[in-house]
Image: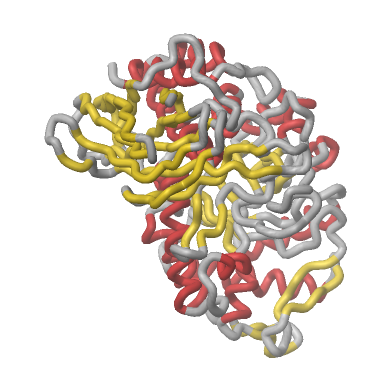
Amino acid sequence: MELWIENSAKQLFQNARPGKGSSGSITLRTPKNAYISAQIMLRDLAPFEIRSVRVLNKAKGEKAGNVRIFYQEYRRFNDNAAYPDELTELTEDIGPREVPAHAAQGIWVDFFVPPEAAAVCTEYTVTVGTGGGEYAAEIALDVADVTLPPCDRGTFGHEYFFNLSDIPDFAPGELFGGRWWEALEKTAHIFREMRNNAVLVPVLQLLRAAGSRRTGKDTWEYKWDIFDRFTDVFINAGCAKAFTIGAFTESVNGRSLEAIGYGSESVRIDVPSDEGALFLTSLYTALSGHIDSRGLTGRFRTHIEDEPHTDGTWKWEREIIRRAAPGIPCGEPLDMLETAKLLAESADWFVPRLDVYAQDPGYFRDRRENGKELWAYSCCFPENGWWLNKFIDMPFMRSRMMTWACKANGIDGFLHWGFNYWNSSPLYGTGPDARFKGDGNIVYPDKERRSLKLSARFINTRDGNQDAELIAICARKKPDETAEILRSVCTDFENYTSDSDALCRAAERLLELAAL
């Protein structure tokens, strides 16, 4: 049996073998209020069974606390390759799991270091029980005297679009029923772990579910109880630095918007139009007053028309919101540079797709210098192999590098659409024939536990968001040295290291700098 340990940024297939210098021990260096992982790999010439995994604190001689064990799953796609991504959380005694001959099997050991932890180095033994005996790996967890801020006070913004309707896929039950709310709370805690601190709010869906309705030609009655319960879930979980109102207007062409009808139903209104202006004025006036009454002014922003290709409807709606809700900034994912430039004076928040940003970085930097907020996003495109992205069939360290590229370019946050879109779409679904493999999901449904399974890409996204907070700490102390560390592994979304060891060494350099 071969056993060795690798860092969390390295993608390891079932044909993986230990490299020169590989060993069964590793030292993980981490700040406080942070997660950190390592992968234990096992491989044998003959088939074998994994039956148990135990993590022991060597000094105390007892079971380790604040640690989880994950079993690496391998999903086969249309290129006939089995990719590592989905992770199944294990208890100590997992029952026999069969590993084929000549195949490597990954087991993730994931530690959480609470903010009150001592800055010490603790040694752990990880014992893997197999049908042929027990095999041990050694992990030293070296905690630095550096504490990351809570998720809802983080300096880097991160947002995933998530699908409310797909939540019953892992927690069967009625939408907005008891089990659904329990599942939403689990989602919020997973957001906190990832440091996903901007929460998309499907305002109309929540209002209609509560019985909000149109009452006259220019009047609507709004009921806020489900909206309030929804936002409270994320506030109470500590992951809601910001809320984003989802766009009501048809994406790309902006020819109609969704509104609330007399029977609480969803209706479409052509725009620009007087009727559309009446609804938007009513809704944003009521929304602004409600969030102000709850003390949430300053936390809300809004999308208007996802990926607009013209500016007419967008600017028309922006002026309505400016009058009805002057405290709510407006911004948009932008997949065309031309449109981004048309919105130069109207938008408060620019979110160019990676390749759009790359066409004219200076333009977007100028927007930021003029007081605008600047984020970046990816959504299926760009799909060329040299871009950073979150595809399963690309090295999953790219999910971590995405944050580094943002920080290297002075970008304030990152948005990705596909948190839990589980379907059979030939473009982005979880089926084997998907073109954009994994772009629609970074978690998987766990029906057995009525929860969510994490993924290797999730862990790397989380690690990248933690790195962003380290970078911010270091930049305040030693800006030149911090910039040099960034440049050593990444300059932009097309130019970055492919060496996971180099990335982890750079993160350790940040930690050393932050601890000074």
Quadrant in the picture for the N terminus: top left
- At x 73% / y 83%, what residue is drawn? 261
**Front in this rendered view, residue 161 or 399:** 399
Q: Is residue 255 left or right of residue 156?
A: right
Q: Position of residue 23 (x, y in %)?
A: 39, 17
Classify 25 as above or below 459. Answer: above
- Residue 81 visible at all: yes
Q: Quadrant of residue 63?
A: top left
Quadrant in the picture for the C terminus: top left
- Residue 328 visible at all: no
Q: Is residue 229 left or right of residue 254?
A: left
Q: Is residue 145 left or right of residue 14?
A: left
Q: Is residue 498 left or right of residue 258?
A: left
Q: Position of residue 242 (x, y in %)?
A: 50, 52
Name the colouring of the figure: secondary structure
Q: Position of residue 502 (x, y in %)?
A: 51, 15
Which residue in the rendered view is the most extreme toward the left? 60
**Front in this rendered view, residue 287 or 441:** 441
Classify 21 as above or below 244. Answer: above
- At x 48% / y 35%, what residue is drawn? 106
**Front in this rendered view, residue 73 or 322:** 73
